[in-house]
Image: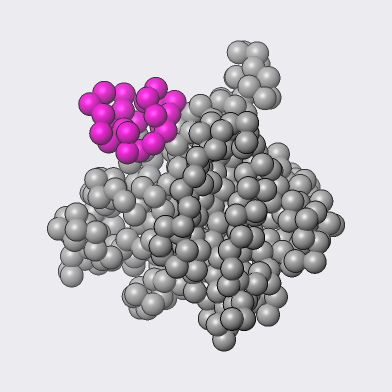
Amino acid sequence: MTPMDAILVINAGSSSLKFQIFGIDNGTLSRRVRGQLEGIGARPELKAAVEGEPSVDKSYSLAEIHDLPAAITTVMSWLQSLSGFKLVAVGHRVVHGGPDFSKPVLVDKSTLERLSRFEDLAPLHQPNNLAPIRLVMEHHPGLPQVACFDTAFHRSHPRQADIYALPLSFYDEGVRRYGFHGLSYEYVAQRLGEIAPSVAKGRVIIAHLGSGVSMCAVKNGRSIESTMGFTALDGLVMGTRPGQLDPGVVLYLVGQKGMSADEVSKLLYRDSGLKGLSGISADMRDLLASDDHHARFAVEHFVHRAALQAGLLAAALEGLDGFVFTAGVGENSPQVRAMIAAKLRWIGLEFDADPNERGKTEISTPQSHVKAYVIPTNEELMIARHTLALVG
């Protein structure tokens, strides 16, 4: 049997490596393989399914997989053992495209070097996003690779939305508000167009609520404002990141507390957010299940800040027609959805508890002026689509 042309999609994080293979049939993409290697640097475990059926569930020692490059090598070796697929390209999620990249690009050594300059702007993500590109380039130099950027969807912002009130020279050199989670927003905006075309043509807030958290204001399918800015620290409270923060706090930490830049970076990227507030966990599931008052307070603060930022985006849109929940918390926590929706009654969102609890797509009442939806995101399919478009 002739192997099917296929695209491999890689989404690399600090402790996990997610991957999918999409078969190509007359220009149509269909997912054939889905898996991830979790627990990198702790308890590595590879799980994957082929054609929807479990294919591998294997644990490794820390000596075997102690870092991301080792994880990439292991996953690529397992993928090469599969029959029936001929990889024609690899698509990658890359968090930061900086001011240079406003759409997906084929990656060469020059592009890779330019992207590495943004590692300090996304230290939790960018180095890990680029590591598999380097490895594939080294071992499979003839295989096309496509970088798809989380910042690209937001490049449609008006200039006044992206500029900081600093001397203009800073904007010219790239100090500006970029916005992130763009691949997720792009996919969800397209799905909303299929589910509720009239709402999708209007004014919509999409809430990407996961470990990383942000919201995006979308008008007629295009991003016009986002809660995230120069880095992925800004905006909403996240698992380990604080969200919106007075810059004076950083000056205080450095000047009065004597903290180094590395210490401040660790505090803001790894030890704040839900983890810092609760002192228990960065995982919303743990906090919702806990009776500890610090856990309850962390959840309440998360909801409070989410509602405030939603009001900001509604002002940018000059009204609201739809509100969409997506990503891990947004898709799987009826309790968090209900808490946020309760604070949005003022703008015309009439929440319906029954479909929310039953996991339905539409969770607002028929009479609601603002329609509310739960739409699972699919960044990997979005990456595959962009990759196919570039490699033909």
The part of the image, by quadrant, that contains residue 232 is top right
Q: Residue furthest left?
A: 354
> Is 389 placed above or below 379 here?
below
Res. 98 in view: no
> Is 126 placed above or below 207 here?
above
What secondary structure characterizes most of the magenta part?
helix
Name the residue rendered at 46%, 57% in the picture.
Answer: 55
Question: Where's residue 300, x and y in %?
Answer: 30, 35
Question: Where's residue 313, x and y in %?
Answer: 43, 55
Q: Residue furthest bottom?
A: 26
Residues 387 and 52: in front is: 52
Question: Where's residue 27, x and y in %?
Answer: 58, 83
Name the quarter where the N terminus is drawn.
bottom right
Residue 176 is one of the magenta-drawn residues: no
The part of the image, by quadrant, that contains residue 142 is bottom right
Residues 286 and 179: in front is: 286
Asked whether, in this view, residue 102 is left or right of residue 186, the answer is right
Name the residue rendered at 35%, 78% in the picture.
Answer: 198
The part of the image, by quadrant, that contains residue 383 is bottom right
Name the quarter where the C terminus is drawn.
bottom right
Res. 381 in view: yes
What is the magenta range?
Answer: 274-300
Question: Where's residue 196, x and y in %?
Answer: 34, 75
Asked whether, in this view, residue 71 is left or right of residue 306, the answer is right
